[in-house]
Image (tube, grey):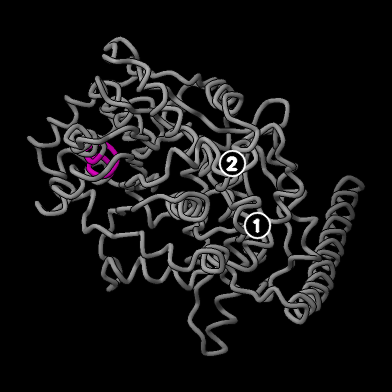
Amino acid sequence: METEIQGFYRNKTVFITGGTGFLGKVVIEKLLRTTEVKKIYSLTREKRGKDIKERVEIWRNDPFFKTLRETKPSAFDRVLPVAGNCLAPDLGLSEVDRRVLTSEVQIVIHGAATVRFNEPLHVALAINTRASRLMVQLARDMRHLVAYLHVSTTFSNCFIFRVKEIFYPEHLSCGSEKVLALSQLVSPQVLDDMESALRGSFPNTYTYTKALAEDVVLKECEGLPISIFRPAIITATWKDPVAGFIDNLYGPTAMGYGTGRGILRLTSYKRNHRSNIVPADLCGNLVLASLWHTANEHSKVPRRDPSIQPTIYALAPTETNDLFSQDLVKMALESRKTSALTKMIWYPFCYNVSSPRLFPILAFFYHTLPGYFFDLALQLSGRKPRLVKIYRKLHSGLALMKYFLQNNFYFDIKNSDRLFTLMSQEDRCLYDFDMENVDWRDYLNKSIRGIRFYLAKDDPTEESIQRAQRLLKKLKFVHYSFVTLLCCISGLLLWFLIKFLCNLISC
């Protein structure tokens, strides 16, 4: 027997952007596996020599889709790629595809975005803001539209440290319509040169252009069944359909992978820093539930009141079930024995330097200097040096994250909590997004095993685990031997220094 949410998606046609991204794959998999959705049109662009059909076809062999392959092998036939590009005028859609979408689509999920913090402004504006306006305009032409979801981020208003599920247009230096109009009048280079003045208090082009995109939705939403989803930092899946699935190296995942390889040894975050991460499967569940609720709410209003703003659904850790960065690092390091990687270069450890001023100094001794020694050893063995280059990228990435690591953010999720209470018991089990019940230790253990399998490509076999444990023991012995040697050298230097000072005083 179908639940209410399952019944809502039966025989519906969905159009999704960002479907080949991490959250997009999670949403599509859940739709195909748990509902009888009719079709899913996925806006897809050619990438790395693969055409749009090939990019979707590789999903059939992706380990993330294993459960779907086993339970509904023909489900992939319902995913139909549509050629397009958020950078292109009119989203790069052909007239034929546009007619198909406007005549068939009932549900829209706009999740395509560039998440690079240092993206040039003209690129971030085109993908994150202009494409959002083009999508809303396209939705207006969809004759059977019942629900539209715009995927944003909790950090779209990160100049505020307690963010409510409301719009904050007053903090933009210029409204979205003015900035988009300006982008049509000046060259990309001139627009990029104006970044600092336009961006204002926003720490990077990503958060700025996502805030502009929310402003687009606010200004152009009248009459549309539209809502906004603001997730915090999306990390690996917790349970569904597989535990620990991750396919990217962003934010905390990159730091966890770097620590596991023995490359990242120092980080810098504020004491008692809140780690605002959310499991990807819970995010996918909220996406599907919010669309169901948006359609229901819109159907109750014969004529949409223009004063009614789109509902915003945020998802982040609650203050009563919080996760702090120091606990995250501690739990991650505790899993060294069970989830060690087979390709470590040093014994995994990670110290926090809470002072941003002290971090570069210590990073030179913990990262850069050892990097030169490793690269020298690689050159002497006839291999290409690479560690110094990796550390430059790593330090650049940490610098981009500095604002978020040195500040604490609290996100209101009352609308999401309210939505959860409106769902039936069956739907709560099937589309769970209750952050209050997340077992962080269990989640992190699964996430680290996921990093080992999906990113490090280590087999989940007993032989692979034992091989990693043997390497871990060797590296641990080398690490502590080296630390002991350094302590002895430091002790000797200190002894000589004291002796020297004593001789000076006696003279």
- Circle 1 SS class: loop
Residue 333: x and y in percent read 76, 56
Residue 291: x and y in percent read 42, 34
Residue 390: x and y in percent read 50, 64
Query: Left or right: where does residue 96 sit relative to residue 50?
Result: left
Q: Is residue 424 visible?
A: yes
Q: Residue furthest front?
A: 1
Magenta stretch? Answer: 124-131
Reply yes or no: does residue 126 show up in magenta: yes
Reply yes or no: does residue 115 show up in magenta: no
Comes first in the chain, label 2 or label 1: 1
Give the residue displayed 35% in from the left and 22% down from the top: 299
- Circle 2 SS class: strand
Q: Which of 208 and 44 is in front in this view?
A: 44
Q: Which of 26 and 265 is in front in this view?
A: 26
The residue wearing badge 1 is 243
Quarter-wise, where is residue 202 in the image?
A: top left
Q: Magenta: predominant secondary structure element?
A: helix
Residue 142: x and y in percent read 20, 37
Nearer mark to the viewer, of 2 and 1? 1
Instruction: Please say if the residues under marks 2 and 1 sit with CB atoms less than 8 Å apart.
Output: no
Q: How crowded is mark 2: few (under 14 residues within 10 Å), some or many (20 or more)?
A: many
Q: Distance between the residues labelled 2 and 1?
A: 14 Å
Give the residue displayed 58% in from the left and 39% down from the top: 356
The residue wearing badge 2 is 278
In this rendering, the answer to whether 34 lies above or below 52 is: above
Q: Is residue 365 visible?
A: no
